[in-house]
Image: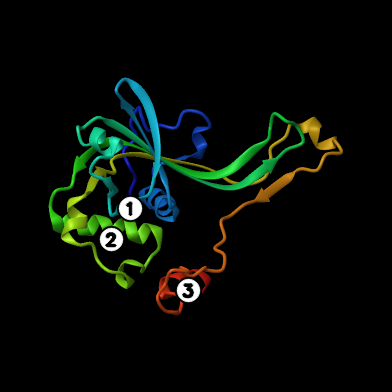
């Protein structure tokens, strides 16, 4: 089992048994996510920006307009922290104190590097596209040179990374199990709904295979 090296930044200190440094576990959590939150210091104050991303092997890609405040700051090599969280359920205990949530999360620390090569840009953009919807990249028009020129891409090496996971039932005080209060788990998940075709389409077309695969 390959693991990330534990550092003072990534070591899970509170409820450390929920921590994981296993690369396969981290990659699985990242690959299921559609959005991440990027934290950094901008002009002396902290900022957290939600954005889409892509992963290829041990690299995370971020993209946006060339004038993006976030990307212009990160390309300077400042410290950055990235978080991904899946909320899997509510954990409802017999006491207010022991209520919790079941979740899977990943925290990444590092520095960003500007992607300048057009071929690597396309690789990065495909990774972002695959993150949004696997197979969509092959169905659509590829980026033009003009679009590549106005798009900025950054990459962050996955080196200082940890996951934290909670699963299972509520944990109450022994005496509280006698209370007449229902307790248990309320699972939650994101479920795709029926696709809605673009009303501006010039002709009626069948729903793309990449979309249909969500329902397979």
Q: CA distance from mark 2 to mark 3?
A: 19 Å
Q: What residue is shown with label 3? A: 212
Name the quadrant containing residue 8. top left
Residue 196 marker: none
Q: Earlier in the sequence, mark 3 or mark 1?
A: 1
Left of 173 or right of it: where is 141?
left
- Residue at 19% from the left image edge and 62% from the top image edge: 144
Q: Is residue 214 visible?
A: yes
Instruction: Name the secondary structure under disc 1.
Output: strand
| Spot occupied by residue 23 in the image (x, y as percentages of width and height) | 36, 49
Q: Between disc 2 and disc 3, whose residue precedes?
A: 2
Q: Which residue is mark 2?
A: 126
Residue 106 location (% of width, % of height)? 42, 42
Whether label 2 touches label 1, CB < 8 Å? yes
Rendered location of residue 80, percent (x, y):
31, 33
Nearer the observer, disc 3 or disc 1? 3
On screen, residue 99 above or below 155:
above
Q: CA distance from mark 3 to mark 1?
A: 21 Å
Q: Is residue 121 visible?
A: no
Q: Would you call the spot at circle 3 few (<14 residues within 10 Å), some (14-19), or many (20 or more)? A: few
Choose between 216 and 105: the one closer to the eye: 216
- Residue 95 lies, in percent from the top left, at 75, 32
Total marks placed: 3
Query: What residue sits right under mark 1 in the picture?
Result: 54
């Amino acid at each position: 089992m390959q693991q990330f090296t534990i550092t003072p930044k990534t070591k899970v200190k509170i409820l450390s048994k929920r921590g994981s440094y296993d690369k396969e576990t981290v990659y699985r959590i990242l690959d299921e996510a559609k959005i991440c939150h990027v934290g950094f210091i901008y002009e002396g104050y902290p900022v957290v920006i939600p954005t889409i991303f892509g992963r290829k092997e041990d690299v995370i890609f971020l993209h946006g307009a060339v004038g993006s405040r976030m990307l212009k700051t990160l390309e300077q090599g400042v410290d950055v922290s990235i978080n991904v969280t899946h909320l899997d359920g509510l954990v409802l205990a017999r006491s207010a104190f022991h209520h919790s949530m079941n979740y899977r999360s990943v925290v990444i620390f590092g520095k960003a590097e500007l992607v300048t090569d057009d071929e690597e840009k396309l690789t990065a953009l495909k990774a972002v596209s695959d993150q949004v919807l696997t197979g969509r990249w092959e169905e659509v028009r590829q980026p033009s040179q003009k679009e590549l020129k106005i798009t900025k891409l950054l990459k962050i090496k996955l080196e200082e990374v940890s996951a934290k996971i909670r699963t299972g039932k509520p944990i109450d005080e022994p005496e509280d199990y006698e209370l007449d209060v229902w307790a248990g788990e309320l699972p939650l998940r994101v479920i795709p709904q029926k696709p809605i075709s673009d009303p501006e389409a010039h002709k009626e077309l069948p729903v793309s295979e990449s979309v249909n695969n969500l329902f397979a």
